[in-house]
Image (cartoon, grey):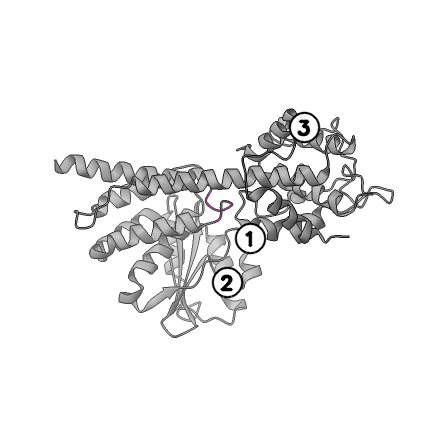
């Protein structure tokens, strides 16, 4: 019996040489697989389909519609185990456009112990996505298509989509009009560009990248650098970090400054939780800085300013994200384009779960527009 990892590798090799050739001859089934892979609203269906097809390919006696061990009978299996143990590593290895975490912890699929027939209402959004996945599982159960073929077909479409995404990014970068020796964007133009990007949907990760890019650009002048960023969905308790970004001195592992990002108002409770994290940590920091995209209440500012002595000399402050960026870019005016390049690279390097494809494309389009406006004004 082949291992699940070997089955995935075999499915990949089956399609990677020529992505134009479908594995499934039934046009309706193939279109349904493509629909699941391309659905922009919810990508949990892809991992559900991959995990179930992998389980059935691995153990032919399993009922593909029974991915819960709580279901009675010898033909059920743990879809979550296949998803977490094998699908996660596979999609990361090949940079496939999938959710980073298991589908079986989404509201539609967790705490279930039912057979996934086409009649089941999983109460997921959009409903048509889940109906389509359940129909595909039934197609396999009815013997209309092999699980191995549907696994390969799903991987084929994911590779097509991955390549399309890469090509769009490449084209957008090629269209950028920044030329060597040309007058760079002004500080205020860059601030406006970043502010527009922050106003795009699903932008909660961006404040982290703004601060990280600032330290990347100015680290040689500051004698400080940001430690590698944790994944966006990793809790501080899991990583051992005090915040979203940790700053150290060159040649020194001790964290001196910690940044915590908020896309909502910072409260006194937030500050108190940070104080407790510091007390529970072996790290002895100098500064704890909140960066928020929302309005800062004076009472919170005053509370932060008044706890210096209570914390043994640790400075607490709450800063507005755009004000922080504006001050940084004016302070390090000659590094403003270094900041912009660092920010762009961080945005493009983030996994789609943190910065999705539309948000990446939005930044490049906004930058192109800003640089085009600059060129027009120079003529």
Give the number of the mark in front: 1 or 3. 1
Q: Residue furthest left?
A: 379
At 63% across and 35% down in the image, what residue appears? 23
| Residues packed near mark 3 inside 10 Å, few (<14), some (14 to 19) or many (20 plus) | many
Give the number of the mark in front: 2 or 3. 3
Judge by depth and name the residue closer to the eye, 87 or 28: 28
Tag 3 residue: 131
Judge by depth and name the residue closer to the eye, 301 or 104: 104
Q: Main secondary structure of the magenta part?
A: loop
Tag 1 residue: 93
From this view, report whether residue 228 is shown above or below residue 107.
Answer: below
Q: Secondary structure at mark 2?
A: loop
Q: Secondary structure at mark 1?
A: helix
Q: Residue 354 colored magenta? A: yes
At 28% across and 38% down in the image, what residue appears? 368
Spatial CA distance of label 2 from label 3 is 41 Å
Which range of residues does the magenta coloring cover? 351-355
At 39% across and 52% down in the image, what residue appears? 346
Q: Residue 102 colored magenta? A: no
């Amino acid at each position: 019996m082949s291992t699940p990892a070997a089955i995935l590798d075999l499915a990949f090799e089956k399609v990677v040489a020529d992505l134009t050739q479908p594995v499934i001859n039934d046009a309706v089934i193939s279109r349904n697989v493509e629909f699941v892979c391309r659905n922009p609203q919810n990508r949990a269906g892809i991992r559900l389909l991959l995990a179930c097809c992998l389980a059935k390919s691995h153990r032919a006696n399993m009922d593909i519609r029974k991915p819960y061990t709580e279901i009675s009978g010898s033909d059920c299996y743990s879809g979550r185990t296949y998803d977490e143990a094998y699908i996660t590593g596979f999609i990361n290895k090949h940079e496939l456009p999938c959710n980073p975490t298991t589908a079986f912890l989404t509201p539609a699929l967790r705490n279930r112990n039912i057979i996934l027939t086409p009649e089941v209402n999983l109460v997921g959004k959009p409903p048509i996505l889940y109906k389509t996945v359940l129909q595909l599982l039934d197609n396999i159960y009815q013997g209309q298509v092999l699980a191995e073929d549907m696994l390969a077909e799903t991987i084929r479409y994911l590779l097509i989509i991955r390549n399309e995404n890469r090509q769009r990014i490449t084209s957008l970068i090629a269209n950028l009009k920044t030329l060597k020796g040309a007058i760079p964007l002004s500080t205020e133009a860059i601030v406006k560009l970043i502010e527009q990007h922050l106003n795009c949907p699903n932008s909660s990760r961006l404040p982290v990248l703004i601060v990280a890019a600032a330290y990347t650009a100015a680290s040689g002048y500051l004698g400080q650098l940001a430690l590698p960023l944790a994944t966006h969905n990793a809790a501080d308790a899991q990583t051992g970090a005090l915040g979203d970004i940790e700053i150290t001195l060159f040649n020194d592992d001790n964290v001196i400054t910690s940044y915590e990002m908020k896309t909502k108002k910072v409260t006194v409770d937030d500050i108190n939780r940070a104080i407790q994290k510091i007390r529970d940590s072996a790290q002895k920091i100098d500064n704890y800085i909140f960066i928020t995209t929302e309005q800062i209440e004076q009472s919170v500012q005053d509370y932060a300013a008044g706890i210096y002595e209570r914390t043994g000399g640790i400075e607490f402050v709450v800063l507005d994200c755009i004000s922080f960026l504006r001050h940084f870019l004016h302070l390090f005016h000659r590094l403003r384009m270094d900041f912009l390049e660092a920010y762009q690279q961080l945005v493009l390097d983030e996994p789609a779960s943190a910065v999705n494809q539309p948000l990446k494309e939005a930044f490049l389009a906004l930058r192109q527009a800003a640089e085009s406006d600059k060129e027009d004004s120079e003529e």
